[in-house]
Image: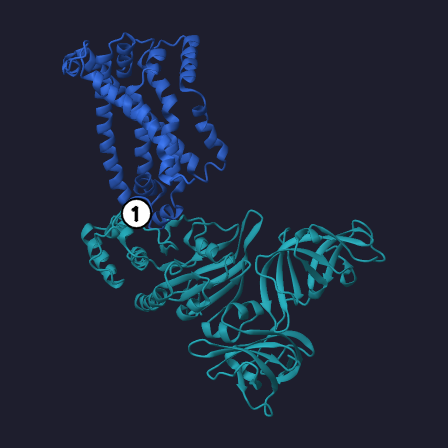
Amino acid sequence: MTQNDVIIRLENVSKAFGDKQVLDNISLDIKKGEFVTLLGPSGCGKTTTLRLISGFTTPDSGTVYMDGKDISGIPPYKRPLNTVFQRYALFPHLDVYDNIAFGLKLAKVPEKEIEQRVRKVLKMVSMTDYEDRDVESLSGGQQQRVAIARALVNQPKVLLLDEPLSALDHKMRQDMQIELKEMHQKLGITFIYVTHDQEEALTLSDTIVVMNEGKIQQIGTPADIYNEPVNSFVADFIGESNILNGTMIEDRKVNFIGHDFECVDEGFGTNNPVDVVIRPEDIYIMNNTTSAQFTGKVTSCIFKGVHYEMLVDTDSGYELMIQDYNAFEPGSEVGMIIKPMDIQVMRKERLCNTVEGVMTDESHVEFLDGEFECGAKAGLEAGDEVTVQFGFDAVELWDHQEEGQIAGEVYSILYKGDHYHLTILTESRGFLYVDTQDIWDKGDLVGITVKPSEIKICRRNDN
Amino acid sequence: MTIKRSSWSIPYLIFLLIFVVLPLVLIAIYAFQDGEGGFTFANIARFFTDSDSLSTFALSLEVAIENTAICLLLGYPAAYILASKDLNRSAVTVILFILPMWINALMRTLATAELFNVFGVTLGKGTLLFGMAYDYLPFMIYPIYNTLNKMDKSFSEAAEDLGATPAQVFRKVTLPLSMPGVTSGIMMVFMPTVSTFAISEFLTNNKIKLFGTIIQENINSSMWNYGAALALIMLVIIGITTLFNDEDEAGKAEGGLI
């Protein structure tokens, strides 16, 4: 890729609102003519990224380039890009024609040309003959078309779309997706699209940028992202998946759900803990149990239209989701096979909780704004700055926030086949990771304690 | 025993009859009566032939228009600043602007008159307009502030995105979309100023007589029939302006707020 191909470049951009870090040092290149989707859960920073490009937000640090020029200080009205807003933002005091002509009139385009261009763009969004209509008399889908026309009529180099289809119903959304894709191909301009809907992202994009917690998790084509997620967040967010703890025994050999499997991944070392992703459609299920790699018992079977979705308890006590065109009745014994190609091995993002703390006396340590008992530690005294480590299962969660040393809320949940891996956002805005058998819901408020015997402490290096 | 829901409204109906409908009927009856109780148009005719009354009425309208204009010119920028998240981050400033409304208007006017007296300002039309603007400004600010505050920020962002400078955003989007607030602000200031009399009495020492003043004078000197006729005329005229405004507002609301 040459330098000239890049139309928008974000370089080490960070942004915080108050004490919340919304974007944490992200860098991103967007090529001319590309359909790029920023994908992530709400609060991941995708809309902020879009607003940095459109100019409604300025970065705290880092630079936004367009065509190689720094545009960080240029106000939105001088940027040659246009936005389709989430709730359309059509001017209610103007009719369809005047809404679309708004930008052209400001640019002092001759009246005749305005008329031609408005008609042309209306034709493109299949809204001919709607010029004189009041925008409020239009349906959601029609308003959406007018909003797209209003942006496109200015012939921007880049079209920004902020969750433009989120207010439409499912069927209409699918139709609009096809139309957007066609428009993109016809116009050849760059589309930057923000959505939290992974299906939409997979359908539309040339490139998907998966974001979470203000960081870019993965950039790739839809197929890359789906088939080779780089971490458990991406695997869980894009499509259905079985995410399991595993051990890389050696190159091309991985152990999970109590069995050894051949795989195609190399370079993870020997006997290293890893995350393993298996898509539900990649597990072959059959009545024959003798030639299977492992066996199990079907616990539920739901018809999903094209396929059946089954939950299977394996012989080693893990629960797997399997999709197959054939139904296997609940209660039946089944055999399963996973091909080496279909096993995606990922490095674990972390193996335990690591936080920074301060000793308050020789058997208590303070971190995340709470004081925890940690057993007597020789050689440490009050005021020592330390690094605290403890396993995912050392953390205990309680129903009532008062029951814990500190309080927090369940931020995200990942099912790992035989347990849940939770991310907890503490009141001091730090993250803790917890393995538990208990069922929690996202957003649950919890009290947090840590088993004293499992806390490991070492003095922090001065540098 | 169950009381029908519709019977809950009976006390309010009685209230309306006694305090709104009955006085209106009485005004109408008095306006068309001569001193002996006979039916006559003389009271109405007297207004339209009496140049004093007519010029007072014209002056009242003039003062009301001027006051409304002053309130609008001062009130719109104030409302805009209060509603802007960049310029005003605190709800306290909004309350401070509305605070004068907590104190009786008569007391405020008396206090203002006293201040003019202390500083030796000659009472006249200037002081009258000052007092009126002071009294009615909150009524202009509040509805405009409300409309601006509720306005979806994405409208102005969309305009800016399409190439409008901040000044153009205001002229082409913010201002037209805030018109419903402006209209109700104008109504709330204009209508009461036409009929006001206390402010002109205190702040001009009755040098300037407004329409409200002559109604009050007539009633006070027991000229009930003529006073009632004047009141009726004022009601009709205000009623007509309200009708105009209503149509105006309805027209805007159609293309107006989401």
Q: For this rendering, which residue is in front, A393 or A67? A: A393
Quadrant (top left, top right, bottom left, bottom right) of the N terminus of chain A: bottom left
> At 39% from the left edge and 32% from the top edge, which residue is drawn?
B142
Which of the 4 image quadrants contains residue A25? bottom right
A446 and B220: which one is in front?
A: B220
Q: Is residue A129 above or below residue A415?
A: above
Return the x and y of residue A168 as percentages of the image width and height: 36, 60
Residue type highlighted by circle 1: Pro
Q: Which residue is mark 1?
A: A92
- Most extreme residue toward the front, as rendered? B1
Which residue does the image show at 27% across and 52% down from the upper left?
Answer: A137
**A305 is higher (above) or lower (below) than A50:** below
Quarter assignment of residue B45: top left
Query: Can the viewer see residue A104?
Result: no
Drawn colour of chain B?
blue
**Is A413 or B76 nearer to us in this picture?**
A413
Instruction: Find chain A in the image and tell me its colour.
Output: cyan
- Is residue A302 among what the camera can see? yes
Q: Residues within 10 Å of mark 1 (few under 14, many from 20)?
A: many
Q: How many marks?
A: 1
Image quadrant in which you'd find residue A436: bottom right
Q: Is residue B215 above or below residue A396?
A: above
Between B13 and A330, which is closer to the camera in this rendering?
Answer: B13
- Residue B179: percent from the left, percent from the top? 30, 37
Estimate the x, y position of residue B54 in percent, counting from the top left: 19, 15
**On the picture, is A396 further left or further right than A182?**
right
Residue B32 in the image: state x and y as whole percent.
Answer: 18, 17
Image quadrant containing the C terminus of chain A: bottom right
Q: Determine the secondary structure under disc 1.
A: loop
**Chain containing mark 1:** A
Q: Is residue A78 above or below residue B55?
A: below
